[in-house]
Image (spheres, rainbow, N blue to C red):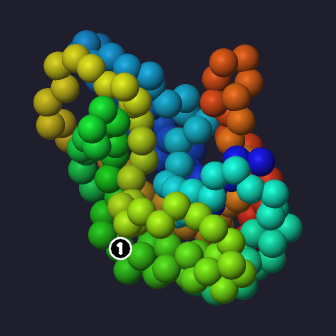
Amino acid sequence: MRLFIAIQLSDEMKQSVIGTMHELKKAGVNGRYVPAQNLHVTLAFLGETREVEAVKAAMQTIVCKPFRMSFADMGVFTNLLWVGIKGNQGLNKLAKYVVSALDAAQISYDRKKFVPHITIIRNMGGPWKKAAAPKGDMTVRKVSLMKSEQKDGKRVYTEVFSVNLG
């Protein structure tokens, strides 16, 4: 199973990002827009693994209080357009707790530096210029284990497990 650990966005934050995506489309920015139901902040990408139960057990050891999270800016990694998340002590602590739990359980994951963001367009092209980030914030109260699979040629993310913070 292809898995990752993430924060799912509140409906209000999703709507704000969707509004920004519509504005980008109107401005002629093309690429593969991420479907609204797939918008999230990745905390750890595990990739293909059969260690689902071990990952669930590791997630249950995460101790972190709920915290506020809000949008910061927009930017590009090669051909990905993303919305950034404001620097946040709660978010950084949560990311550290997640990887510490995975390390303690000896579960492998992608060890790239944590850069909190929401990917909104893949294979981006067109006239994108630095734009204002969407507005919005939310209280993060849970962390989700997500399954990623191809269905009818589209990437579908499904929550398979979650833990509440606090």
Q: Is residue 34 left or right of residue 75?
A: right
Q: Position of residue 64 (x, y in %)?
A: 58, 83
Residue at the image point whose x is 56% and y is 76% from the top: 99
* Nearer-the-camera pick, 147 or 109: 109
Quarter-wise, where is residue 140 in the image? bottom right
Q: Is residue 25 above or below residue 17?
A: above
* Mark 1 closeness class: few <14, some 14–19, many ≥20 residues within 10 Å: few
Q: Is residue 46 above or below residue 55?
A: above
Q: Secondary structure at mark 1?
A: loop
Residue farthest toward the right in the current orientation of the protein: 53
20 over 77 or under it: above or below: above
Label total for image: 1
Which residue reaches farthest left? 129
Image coordinates of residue 157 in percent, x first then y, are: 68, 40
Q: Position of residue 14 (x, y in %)?
A: 50, 41
Figure quadrant of residue 132: top left
Q: Which residue sits at x=34%, y=36%?
A: 80
Q: Is residue 19 visible?
A: no
Residue at (72%, 17%) from the top-left corner?
152
Residue lying at 37% horizontally and 20% vertically, measured from the top left:
31
- Left or right, residue 98 beside residue 118: right
Q: Is residue 57 visible?
A: yes
Using the rendered view, name the quadrant where residue 38 is placed: top right
Q: Amino acid at mark 1?
A: Asn
Please indicate whether residue 162 sits to the left or right of residue 72 in the image.
right
Considering depth in this image, is 26 or 108 the residue closer to the camera?
A: 108
Which quadrant would the C terminus be assigned to in this image?
Answer: bottom right
Pointer 1: what residue? 88
